[in-house]
Every structure is written in structure tokens, then in C-alpha cells.
Amino acid sequence: MRSRVCMFFALCIIVSLCGCTGFKKSLFDSGISLERKLSKLEQKTVQVGKLSVPYLERPGSGETIVMLHGITADKDNWVRFARYIPKEYRIIAVDLPGHGDNVRDFQTTYTIEYITEGFADTVKALGLDRFHLVGNSMGGYVSTIYSSDNPGKVLSLCLIDPAGAKSPQLSDRELALTRGVNTLIPKTKAEFDELLAYGFHKQPFMPWPARSVLAEKYIERSEFNQKLWNDVWDNRVDVESYFGNITMPVLLLWGDKDRIIHVSTVSVFEKGIPQTKTVIFRDCGHMPMLEIPKESALIYTSFLQGTFKDPKSDSKTH
């Protein structure tokens, strides 16, 4: 009992010395470091022109897998998903231009073409020749465009709830947008909680103080994130115009409870890319790699290794 009281007072002293916000951020950073370590991922940077681009890498003796996050997200979205990918694969998860630990420049117009070009420059700087490409949401948008422009470099394409196509049925996010509400750009703690409710059907466990620190980060970056959104949205191109050059094998993963991009959009990709193999996860939201990392990673691995089976009879998938 006495030792617990001493620990409590010690913690109070640390908080008072460091400041509550700084202490929480320190704990959060330690948690992220641990998550990366458990997945054998190491943070690195590569020089791309005048910019130093951050990325995570897990070494491997086999083929390389590159992973791209969604809008306002970052490379750490892939940490738990990567944990279930066989160790022989080399894994690289990059921060796209204007995202994560990259420079945020209000003078730059972050169109989807600009972001894709930035990714292409990162690929060159990393010396990647042939690799598998995985993208979620806006990362799927970028992945589709890049694969269409560079079919000789992409061994296979995995799209997870990808953006860029016109949905046959409006999602909850799109309906909110018609009312002038952008649920992807939270400016308050309550709006951040709403963002999580839109992103996940069953929210993954986030230990204290992760939720609080993430909320503060999103609120702090809300002005720039709004600019990011405007740059992409106001200059958007129809991803369907790139489908014709997609010749590599394609795996499409989607959560049937996706409130950000409606699951009906699956039909657009299946029609435009006939070789697509599709898995629709039941009771899952917009980011299966975060909500069900093991299940989605195992299905992706079976696709890579040629053991993929049609899961339509599975009770957990479509």
C-alpha cells in the first residue's frame, strides 16, 4: 500500500514538472514506439529533393510491400496490420506529402496528382524496382493512379475501401457533406469522437492517453487538414479513368458498415477492373487494417501467396 502511495505522488510530481499535455504526449509516443517495435518496424527518412520523407520499414529477404494511408492519417495506420504479414516480406509504410511527420506547407496545393507524384518520387529515392502496393481510402486513390501510370513496377494492388470513384449510394459522410458538415476534419473533441464513429464500426482499443492525444493533434492541425481536403476535393479526378491500365492482380477489401465511402462502390471497381478479387467484411468500417488487422492481413497474405479462396460462404466475410 505504501509503495502505491509513493508511486502516486511520484506520478503527480512528474505531471506537475512536465505539464499534463507534455506528459500525455510522452506516454503516447512511447506507446507508438512499442507498437512499432512489436511489428519490427523502424522509423527512417529518405531525402526526396529538398524534403526528408519519413517512413517505417521492416526488413525482409523476399518481395517488398508498400503501404499508403488515407487523408489526414499517417504511416502508423499500418503497424498492427504489418504484424501479421509473414516475416520474409519487406514492408515500407510511408507518410504521403502533407501528412504525418512530413512538412505541412500552406503554399503548396496538395492535389491528388501532386500527392501521387510525391509518392512516385519517394519510390525512386528508395530505389524500389518492383513491389506490391496497398492503399486505404485516399491511399487507395493514390495507389490506383500510380499503378495505372507504372504498371511495370507494381506486382499486385490491394485496395482497402479506396477513394476516388463515384458511389452508387451516398455514404453517411457524403450526406453530412451536403449539409455543410465535413466529419473528416474535426475541430473539437466532440467532433473527433464523431470522426472515430464514422471511421469504425467497432472502435479498436486505445489505451489512455492515446485518444486524448490524437484528438489534440487533429484539432491542432484542423486548419491545415481543411486545406488538404479542399485541395484534393476541389481538384479531384475520377479514378475510373485510370482503370484501363490496371493489369496486375487486384484485391479489393471493404467494410460493409463503411460510413465514409459506401460499400456499393465495390461494384464500380469490380466493373472497371475485371480481374479484381473482392472481400467484404461484415460488421466492419472504413479501415479494416485497424479494426480487424489480423483477419484482413491473413486474407491479404493468402492473396499474395496464391492461396486466396472465395470467402462468400464465410460467416465473417462476403
Image: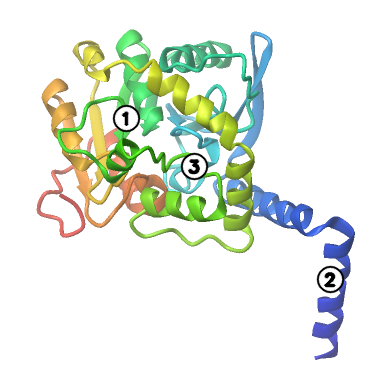
Give me the residue at 30% from left, 36% from top. Answer: 178
Disc ID at residue 163? 1
Marks 3 and 1 sit apart, C-alpha to C-alpha, by 16 Å
Q: Residue furthest bottom?
A: 1
Q: Residue at x 39, y 19 (%)?
A: 234
Please provide percent x and percent y for residue 186: 51, 44
Q: Quadrant of residue 274?
A: top left
Which of disc 1 and disc 3 is earlier in sequence? 3
Q: Dot 3: what SS?
A: helix
Question: Label 1 vs label 2: CA separation?
Answer: 46 Å
**What amino acid is labelled 2 in the image?**
Cys
Amino acid bearing label 1: Ala
- Mark 1 nearby-residue class (10 Å; few <14, some 14–19, many ≥20): many
Q: CA distance from mark 2 to mark 3?
A: 32 Å
Q: Which residue is mark 2?
A: 12
Q: Is residue 82 above or below residue 35?
A: above
Which part of the image, by quadrant, shows the N terminus?
Answer: bottom right
Q: Nearer the viewer, residue 127 or 122?
A: 122
| Residue at image mark 3 | 77
How far across and down, in percent of the image, does residue 80 sit?
A: 48, 49
Q: Residues within 10 Å of mark 2 (few under 14, many from 20)?
A: few
Quarter holding residue 54: top right
Q: Is residue 163 left or right of residue 53?
A: left
Which of the marked residues, 2 or 3, is nearer the chain's N terminus?
2
232 left or right, relative to 251: right
- Helix, strand or loop under label 1: loop
Label 3: how many residues lie within 10 Å, few (<14), some (14-19) or many (20+)?
some
Give the numbered dot on residue 103: none
> Do callouts 1 and 2 mark residues in contact (Cβ within 8 Å)?
no
* Dot 2: element: helix
Amino acid type at circle 3 is: Asn
Looking at the rendered image, the disc whose residue lies closer to the viewer, 3 or 1, is 1
